[in-house]
Amino acid sequence: MSRYRPPRKPGSFYITAEGEKALRDEVFQLWKVERPQVTSVVHEAAKNGDRSENGDYIYGKRRLREIDSRVRFLTKRLESLEVIDRIPDNQNKVYFGAWVTVEDEQGTQQDYRIVGPDEFDLKQRKLSMDSPLAKALLGKNKEDDIIFKTPEGDKELYIANVWYQA
């Protein structure tokens, strides 16, 4: 059995201005704040002699590798992303960055914002544009019905409202 895994298909290359700022803040936090602290801990631990049984040294080096890997990934990703920060002319249609209120058959309403795959967070009601629900919503108008696939089967929703924030 091989350890090879085929490369993952990259997500869409769109991001909101808020999402880009969050990624840049993360890079700053890792590179300018956390990395110097971990480097000084590793430096002090290396002075103590035997590094093979020195927990601060071993775990510090591991954390440095994690930080460097994450910063490298974020830097490359930020170079390839396209920031979408304008509001479309037709504000009754669902485009990237829209807030959408959907209603199910029982009348339960939920609000979602359609964002890029690098910033989605369902706790904050941010839905990745690559998700089945967002794919079904994109391009539809206010008061349209949509059908999308879920693990339990097809689900039908009604688009109650669409709005954009500057």
Image (cartoon, rainbow, N blue to C red):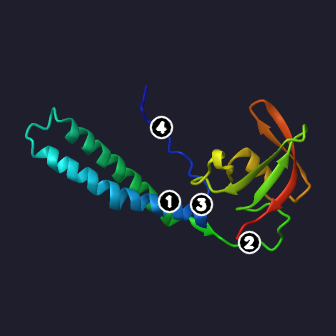
> What residue sits right under mark 2 in the picture?
87
Alpha carbon distance from label 1 to label 2: 22 Å
Asked whether, in this view, residue 45 is left or right of residue 65, the answer is left
Q: Looking at the picture, which amino acid does disc 2 mark? A: Ile
Q: Residues within 10 Å of mark 3 (few under 14, many from 20)?
A: some
Q: Which mark is residue 5?
A: 4
Given the image, on which type of amino acid does mark 1 rest? Leu
Which residue is at 62% across, 48% downward?
121
Circle 3 sits on which residue?
13
Packing grade of label 1 (10 A; few <14, some 14-19, many >=20) is some
> N-terminal of the two: label 3 or label 4?
4
Q: Is residue 76 visible?
A: no
Q: Earlier in the sequence, mark 1 or mark 2?
A: 1
Label 2: how many Cα within 10 Å (few below 14, some 14–19, many 20+): some
Dot 4 lies on which element?
loop
Q: Which corner quadrant holds the N terminus?
A: top left
Label of residue 23 in the image: 1
